[in-house]
Image (cartoon, rainbow, N blue to C red):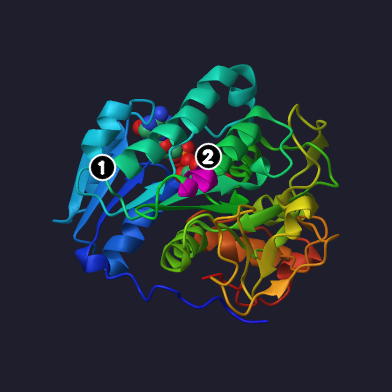
Amino acid sequence: MKSVKQANGAIDWKKKVVLVTGGTGSFGKKFVEIMLRKHTPKKLIVFSRDELKQFEMQQHFKSESLRYFIGDVRDRDRLERALAGVDIVIHTAALKQVPTAEYNPIEAIRTNVLGAENIINASIDRGVEKVIALSTDKAANPINLYGASKLCADKLFIAANAYAAGKTSLSVVRYGNVVGSRGSVIPFFQKMRKAGEIPITDPRMTRFLITLEQGVEFVIKCLGLMQGGELFIPKIPSVKIMDLKEAIAPGCPHKVVGIRPGEKLHEVLLPMEESRHSLEFDDMYIVEPDFEWWKKSYHKGGRKIPEDFEYNSKNNAQWLSIAEIQELAELDGQPAEKSSRSSPSSQTPRKRVRVVS
Ligand SMILES: NC(=O)c1ccc[n+]([C@@H]2O[C@H](COP(=O)([O-])OP(=O)(O)OC[C@H]3O[C@@H](n4cnc5c(N)ncnc54)[C@H](OP(=O)(O)O)[C@@H]3O)[C@@H](O)[C@H]2O)c1
């Protein structure tokens, strides 16, 4: 098996105008930090709604190439304005809390589905070269409205390549839980450990885990690889929820509270039904579009995947130990509590955690 080769050559970022929707979010801020540090694009535009978050970002990041644009992805006219002269779009803006989307389904549809449609149409009309959208494991075999709305968005981005007439390429990156992102399980466990008890939905639960930095680097890599129509899935490790608890709140008692509506015991990144038209590489899977317009020869060196294969968090070949989870949390600025009551496996020597890139 091989790594995927860059089909189009490296992106010359210094000549590119880049816009990130949801640029003030967890992914967006890390993306801005890495782009400014490593790639210095000609212009980097943060697009989001809330002025305070943008103001705070302006205090933090000082760069000539940064611009801020207030706008809502539900507003097509505003997107048309923002996308004038833009070469590359990273679409991250979303409503992403499962319970919020369950209770306010139409709001999630307006942002996640109709917002995606607006991004697609405005990007095509403005002649954007590449659009990459962030998806989630919850979009694979979805059982909640958040996941279903992200699956609709994935389908819109992929199908749009048929009518973008080669001008605009649109692809999707799909991955699982991000270690330190807003509203994610690690900050929640950190809060609950102060209260003295960690609520556990089901001790058998497993999840995929990725750091913000790994997620951003993977998206940047996929921007170089994409032809338009692919769904890129990084190979990332799984964690057991009880190991995650032990890593973040060692020795802290827990209470089993039962699985919540719309939650799965294990997550899926690549459903069995999509393996048929997917390729496996060293560090990723590529789901190829199941459309006539797709040229099968774009990504060389990939291995065909057995038809009964499913990439899920339970059957994953790669698992993080308690010590490795702690290391990742620290890398993502979410330090774990150090305690003399750490379990034996949390005291194993630390290995360097593999980074996808
Ligand atoms: N975090 C995870 O664990 C995870 C895992 C897999 C995939 N993902 C995907 O990764 C993406 C980014 O997640 P994240 O963790 O960075 O989310 P986040 O921290 O909640 O950030 C969301 C961003 O979107 C903006 N936004 C929300 N609604 C908007 C709208 N209608 N128009 C314009 N901007 C809007 C928000 O800013 P304003 O509120 O100011 O507009 C914010 O900047 C999402 O698409 C999510 O589905 C996340």
Q: Which residue is mark 1?
A: 83
Q: Quadrant of residue 308?
A: bottom right
Query: Magenta part mainly helix, strand or loop?
Result: helix
* Residue range corresponding to the magenta coloring: 157-162
- The mark closer to the camera, 2 or 1, is 2
Task: Say if 166 sits above or below 47 in the image.
Answer: below
Q: Amino acid at mark 1?
A: Leu
Task: Kindly report the distance in space between the C-alpha atoms of the residues bearing marks 2 and 1.
Answer: 19 Å
How many dots with numbers?
2
- The residue under the point 47% across, 49% down is 161
What kind of element bears circle 1? loop
Q: Nearer the viewer, residue 345 or 200?
A: 200
Q: Which residue is mark 2?
A: 156
Local crowd size for mark 2, using a 10 Å CA cut-off: few (<14), some (14–19), many (≥20):
some
Residue 306 counted in the magenta span: no
- The residue under the point 75% across, 65% down is 319
Residue 175 in picture, x, y percent from top left: 60, 53
In the rendered image, the residue lying farthest to the left is 64
- Determine if residue 341 is in view: no
Residue 323 in picture, x, y percent from top left: 68, 67
Task: Say if 45 sits above or below 65 in the image.
Answer: above
What kind of element bears circle 2? helix
